Amino acid sequence: MEKKLIEWFNKTGYPFELWTESILSKYDFNSVNSSLYKDQENEIFREIDLVSTRSWESEDGQTVFTIKLIIECKKSENPFVLLCNKDQKKCEIQLGEYYGIEEPISRMLFNNNSKSIELPKESGYGFKLTQGFVKGDETCHKAINTLIKSLNEHLNNDKEFLEYYIESNQHSITIPLLLIDSPFFELKLDNDNKLKIERINSGIVSTITHLSRFYPENFLVPIITKESLENFLKTLEIIGKRNLDHLIQNPLCNLKNYEKTKIVLVDKEKTMPNNGSN
């Protein structure tokens, strides 16, 4: 019976989830397995594989910066394929795309040189994620929708606790992440309109969905392979330290000054001097 259970277990995605949690723990992330979130579209509760958080705190304990990862794990013998346009875009995640407390976190990122997270080398940027050798895109579609719905739920919860976050000066960034244990490829047309396929370590799928909080704007989902996870977490460690330093050095960005500061967007065309030049 034990042997049969192990054989069955190894065919499921559970070993990958347990491995992922162990790697996150190695980098001081605290994880909750099979976390529940409310699917607002269908009014039912569903599971997300992992919700992991790590915080960086000032020496006096008066300032905290937290990164929260909402992770969906997918293990498959079939490769994942990212369909890309001809023009390769720079693969980085703008932190402004994902945040916990809207107005304060936007203020914190204002004039901050750590506003983006670069993905590991050999990354792709595409408009659609699919799987090779299978019919339909149900697996990819379900994974992306799960991440979007779970992210929306977590951001809504953050708003409800805004007063507590302001009082304790806790800043947070929430990032959805699709983690895959399978071969990963980028597929696009070259300059001669011939199909070109390359293996990649990570990527970003940019999709338009009615589930996005900014519909009809594109929603970005970073995709990290199992082999690239540790490099990605090392990058987050750098980002976390830099943003904490930014908050310490720029008190006006802190949540404690939330009601004292405002960011005013200025129309550049109206403020530029009219000297007759273009």
Image: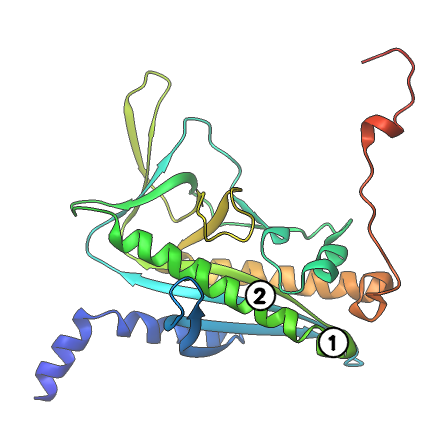
Residue matched to label 1: 163
> Answer yes or no: do the residues labelled 2 and 1 have beta carbons within 8 Å?
no
Residue at 75% over, 58% down: 108
Q: Residues within 10 Å of mark 1 (few under 14, many from 20)?
A: few
Amino acid marked by disc 2: Leu
Image spot of residue 209 (x, y percent): 44, 47
Image spot of residue 86 (x, y percent): 41, 26
Would residue 190 appear left or right of 70 to someone viewing this image? Answer: left
Q: Is residue 59 above or below residue 132?
A: below
**9 or 130, nearer to the observer:** 130
Image spot of residue 192 (x, y percent): 33, 16
Image quarter of the C terminus? top right
Q: Earlier in the sequence, mark 2 or mark 1?
A: 2
Image quarter of the N terminus? bottom left
Image spot of residue 5 (x, y percent): 13, 82
Residue at 57% over, 61% down: 236
Q: Is residue 227 visible?
A: no
Say the numbered circle drawn on residue 155.
2
**232 or 203, nearer to the observer:** 203
**172 or 112, nearer to the observer:** 172
Q: Is residue 213 visible?
A: yes
Q: Residue furthest top?
A: 276
State the scheme by which the image is colored.
Answer: rainbow
The image quadrant that residue 42 belongs to is bottom left
Q: Residue furthest bottom?
A: 1
Residue at 16% over, 46% down: 135
Amino acid marked by disc 1: Glu
Q: Residues within 10 Å of mark 2 (few under 14, many from 20)?
A: some
Helix, strand or loop at disc 1?
helix
Say the numbered circle drawn on residue 112.
none
Would residue 186 appear left or right of 79 to someone viewing this image? Answer: right
